[in-house]
Image (cartoon, rainbow, N blue to C red):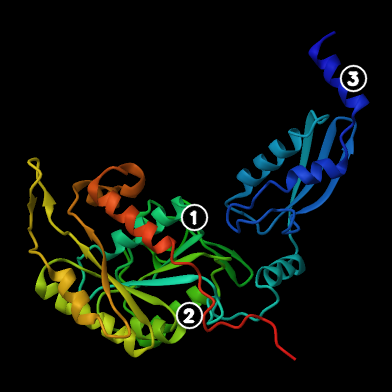
Amino acid sequence: MTDSASASEASSVNPASEAQVLTALRRVIDPEIRQPIVDLDMISGVSVDGDTASIALKLTIVGCPAADTIERDVREAAASVSGISSVNVDVSIMTRAERDALTDRLRGGRPKTVQFGPDSLTRIYAVTSGKGGVGKSTLTANLGVALAARGLRVGIVDADVFGFSIPGILGITGAKPTQVNDMILPPLAHDVKVISIGMFVDEHTAVSWRGPMLHRTIQQFLTDVFFGDLDVLLLDLPPGTGDIAISLGQLLPQAEILVVTTPQPAAAEVAERSALVARQTGQKVIGVIENMAGLPQADGSVLDIFGRGGGADAATRLSTPDEPVAVLASIPISIALREGGDAGLPIVLSHPDDPAARAITELAGRLAVRGRGLAGRKLGFSVT
């Protein structure tokens, strides 16, 4: 008996059902929304005729960048069902009403507002510095990737509107968000959801906006961009104490501050100012990250190019009796870290054994175990 005859006989004895195909399709995840396409009502029909499955697939928009991936995954999932040897997929586009229903479902029926309100369980870390050039964006990008590698759901908001660099560091220069009605789906880089003004303007464009426009941009990032249920949201702030830092203090007062500085005392003193502004808006400073903390030498010694002790001094001066501040990590100077940022390949993936990569990974480990707290949040029930 031939293989084809055996398959035909098996399918006639145990024919596949529509329910089995639909169950298999539940394994297909939309790569942008990160939810099963069945739950998103992207499968509008399934039928089985003998050993052939016919599936009606509805994409969210015309030109969906994930269209080929979704159709491929649908075919593979349906073909994996015992008794199915042929798969037909009819691809169409959701109607406006169907897209409205989808965006409403994703928002949980809530009106459009800042996603990470005071009742959110997402840990929000705002990475700040007093001055530019201390490696804040490189650390933010690598930290996000390291957290995602631990299985956490991570998002990054590149809030450095004037000096946006996160897309380049993560290797997604040129990536564009997908827009479904008034909802923006952020691109994915190394399992991290990312949004940046660099995705909406030419990479060589100089952004020159004043306060109100900056505030509106950050507000849109936090309302229109659908991140879903995140474990951690990282904010890459611009250096200094300007409009964006103040806006984020108003929009996300529960954010916790990570201060990045070099070991140089002068840089540490400037870094403290950004932390003090954050405190004025009600945010909590949880730690200092000392970057460029010496260049390891072949003989095991360390060359302190930018001096030493600045991070510890900043942490001591920022500490209060009610709010102690520690040095959470000391990141050594690394050529691979710089090269990874230029090439768009985070060092925590490309060179995980590099001393800088190990330090960032250890930092991610420390932040990952700081669970999403319930203190001060509404629990959704009342006592009568």
Residue at 72% over, 59% down: 40
Of 40 and 212, the residue lying toward us: 40
Q: Nearer the viewer's eye, disc 3 or disc 2?
A: 3
Pointer 2 local density, CA inside 10 Å: few below 14, some 14–19, many at least 20: some
Where is residue 344 drawn, in percent x and y?
A: 34, 50
* Mark with earlier residue (1, 2): 1
* Mark with earlier residue (1, 3): 3
Pointer 1 local density, CA inside 10 Å: few below 14, some 14–19, many at least 20: some
The dot on residue 188 is 1
Gap in angstroms between the C-alphas marked 3 and 2: 60 Å
Gap in angstroms between the C-alphas marked 1 and 3: 44 Å
- Where is the N terminus found, in terms of image quarters? top right
Relative horizontal placement of residue 211, taking residue 193 as reference (left or right): left
Pointer 2 residue: 219
Where is residue 58 drawn, in percent x and y?
A: 74, 54
Residue at 79% over, 14% down: 3
In which quarter of the view is residue 205 placed? bottom left
Pointer 3 residue: 9
